[in-house]
Amino acid sequence: MKFILKFSLIPLLLHTLTSHATLTVTNIAAGGAYSLFLKSDGSLWVVGANNSGQLGDGSTNPGTYKTNKPENIVASGVMATAAGISHSLFLKSDGSLWAMGDNSSGQLGAGPINKTNRPQQIVFSGVTTITAGQDHSLFLKSDSSLWGMGENNFGQLGDGTFRYSTNRPEQIVTGAVMAIAAGGAHSLFLKSDGSLWAMGYNAYGQLGDGTTNNVNQPEQIVASGVTAIAAGQLHSLFLKSDGSLWAMGYNAYGQLGDGTTNNVNQPEQIVASGVTTIAGGGLHSLFLESDGSLWAMGYNAWGQLGSGTYYNTNKPEQVVASGVTTIAAAVSHTLFLKSDGSLWATGYNYYGELGDGFIDNGSPFGTSTPEQIIPSPSQALLDSRASKTNLQFTATCGFGGTFYLLAGTNLTQPLSQWTPVATNIINNRTNNLFSATLTNAVNSSNAQQFYIIRSQ
């Protein structure tokens, strides 16, 4: 993730280095305090908290349990990702299911191991869809059967029991399932006839069955017409074929978007039409309309709504006017993709989960304005040259990290041979400036000196 700006002096010319085509982002998942995304070459990238090995990079040193810049874990062949609180799943193009991270409740489906910090193959073939809840996981096979593993103390696996957990995949529904969603401790699935089914924790009405009783086997909530589902920590969302948005469950922060903060135990209509995509986070919700606009509601103390403020809202608020294609809501941060394949992020960043090179360990612990993560934006360069022999450079860096000012006199010379003349480590969002003053940098009126500011 490098961005490079090049400029020549005497005369002063400013231009951007020619770069290779940038791979676009095609798939995203947002976990407890970390993020996963796929690039168009099928590579898997990770960023954020790694306390249980959920990034899958093999890290075991407690002092380096997080990363604030995306790192590549799998080189190719990945087609889908899912993120829980501290465990991750991904699906390869051969239909194999892989997992890493916390397994204390069996959510990886890998047997009795406690956790793993490297990807481990769970199912060899036939998997088509995956989703991860707080401490449980669900997946579909090519025969449309539903499988689950992990915590089940509230009946979220839907196997008819309240046994604590299972650490191997077990079949829940034999067929006709076409979509799945896992919340904090509840599960939703959609059948091919458009019916919505639910099971698990229901203390706040998130199952939508009109009660607050937990359920340990699938029960039908809506008979037909449902086209998409999403589960937050304690609330649920779904779409109907007419583009209407419906919600139920916990609403103390307005995450249902109905204009109140009252919990609801039956589906209520939030938006009448035009909604195409939905996502449920910890205490916030997102949706897209047919014009590509992004809307958000709910808890916003960390800026996860991306509204430019830190105020909660109990009604849908437009965050981006157009061009958004994919959304993911985590516990306290948000990711989205635009139609050009660019990845954007907003919200909590104490663990580097936004992937912008910063660790925001002071209030407000993140950003409330969406920022572009991939491809990296070029920093704005301001030249305040005082004289030929006293050159001052200032660059506003959109990303944290180590920045170098390199000098050379010959453009054909390899970059590795250019001389570092100044270095600045930027790790604070409020002080993201590279500045350098070079004395006697140009000692001849006929000389031509070239400079590059490069990040690492």
Image: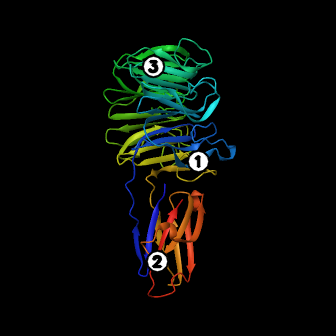
Q: What's the amino acid at mark 1?
A: Thr
Q: Residue at 57% x, 76% y: name it.
A: 437
Mark number, residue 67 = 1
**Horizontal and vertical percent position of residue 121:** 52, 29
Q: Secondary structure at mark 1?
A: strand
Q: Earlier in the sequence, mark 3 or mark 1?
A: 1
Q: Quick one: 417 or 429, which is closer to the camera?
A: 417
Q: Residue at 47% x, 60% y: name it.
A: 3
**Horizontal and vertical percent position of residue 335:** 47, 43
Q: Earlier in the sequence, mark 1 or mark 2?
A: 1
Q: Quadrant of the C terminus?
A: bottom right
Q: Are marks 3 and 1 in contact (CB under 8 Å)?
A: no
**Horizontal and vertical percent position of residue 445:** 46, 88
Q: What's the amino acid at mark 2?
A: Thr
Pointer 3 residue = 146
Residue 197 seen in this snapshot: yes
Q: Secondary structure at mark 3?
A: strand
117 w.r.t. 444: above or below: above
Q: Quadrant of residue 253?
A: top right
Residue 316 seen in this snapshot: no
Mark number, residue 421 = none
Q: Secondary structure at mark 2?
A: loop
**Within 10 Å of the Cα at label 2, are there few (<14), some (14-19), or many (20+) other Cα atoms?**
some
Pointer 2 residue = 409
Give the image's coloring scheme.
rainbow
Q: Earlier in the sequence, mark 2 or mark 3?
A: 3
Q: Are marks 2 and 3 in contact (CB under 8 Å)?
A: no
Task: Kindly report the distance in space between the C-alpha atoms of the residues bearing marks 1 and 2.
Answer: 36 Å
